[in-house]
Image: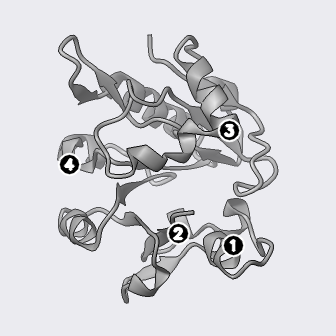
Amino acid sequence: MTPLIVVENSANAKLGPGVCATYRPVGISCPKCGIAHICYAQRGHVALIARRSAKRADNMLRLSGAPLVRHVVSGDWFRRDSLGRARLDREYVRDVVRFHRLNPRTIGWGYTHGWRQWPESVRAAIPRNMTILASVDSLEEAQAAQASGWRTARTTDDLSTKQANEVVCPVDRDKQRGKPPSTTCAQCRLCWESRKNVLFKLF
């Protein structure tokens, strides 16, 4: 069983109306990451769905025909083996890849902290309408991921560290300035349309 909840309309203000989403349990589907102590998926409404996802195994095909899918709002693309080690959940990755091949007009995007554990053969199988960014927590990690061919999504508490090859998430930029969001993920589309790496603000 692949623990998973799929939601036809996430009702997430940042994602935007009508964006579908998937949720996996935090911990058992995650590799180690540098921000586990402040993980947003362990707070509020997202945490409730993430916990419920451990007891569900929804079918991705429920989202067939959706325009946009945000993958793994909570959790990651891994599962724990019998020794408690995080291994890439190839069954789950295959299911998502198959979904996007069957739905060529559906754009999907997500992030992974375990970018080092994705074999090149698996990455090469990802279709054009599916984008996975390496989630990184430092400039050094970002540079290492980029050198391995990944686009990165870097988190920081200081937006002044933005590099020339990065663009700041406009929703986070507005929040930093104390302004209401001027856009949503559905409108912005930077994470899957831009060639630049994305910089997110830790709040």
In this figure, which colouring scheme has been used for the structure? Answer: one colour
Q: Position of residue 91 (x, y in %)?
A: 36, 22
Q: Front-most of 135 and 59?
A: 135
Residue type at tag 3: Gly
Q: Position of residue 196 (x, y in %)?
A: 42, 77
From the image, tell me which residue sits under label 4: 116
Q: Is residue 48 left or right of residue 92?
A: right
Q: Position of residue 79 (x, y in %)?
A: 33, 24
Q: Do the numbered discs 1 and 2 sit on residues whose CB atoms are within 8 Å?
A: yes
Q: The residue tagged with tag 3: helix, strand or loop? A: helix
Residue type at tag 4: Arg
Q: The residue tagged with tag 4: helix, strand or loop? A: helix
Q: Which badge, 2 or 3, is on the more N-terminal residue?
A: 3
In space, the residues marked 2 and 3 are separated at their CA atoms by 19 Å
* 118 lies above or below 86: below
Q: The residue tagged with tag 1: helix, strand or loop? A: helix
From the image, tell me which residue sits under label 3: 44
Q: Position of residue 77 (x, y in %)?
A: 38, 35
Residue found 72% across the figure and 67% down from its top: 187
Q: Which badge, 4 or 3, is on the more N-terminal residue?
A: 3
In space, the residues marked 4 and 3 are separated at their CA atoms by 29 Å
From the image, tell me which residue sits under label 2: 201
Residue found 35% across the figure and 56% down from its top: 134
Is residue 125 in view?
yes
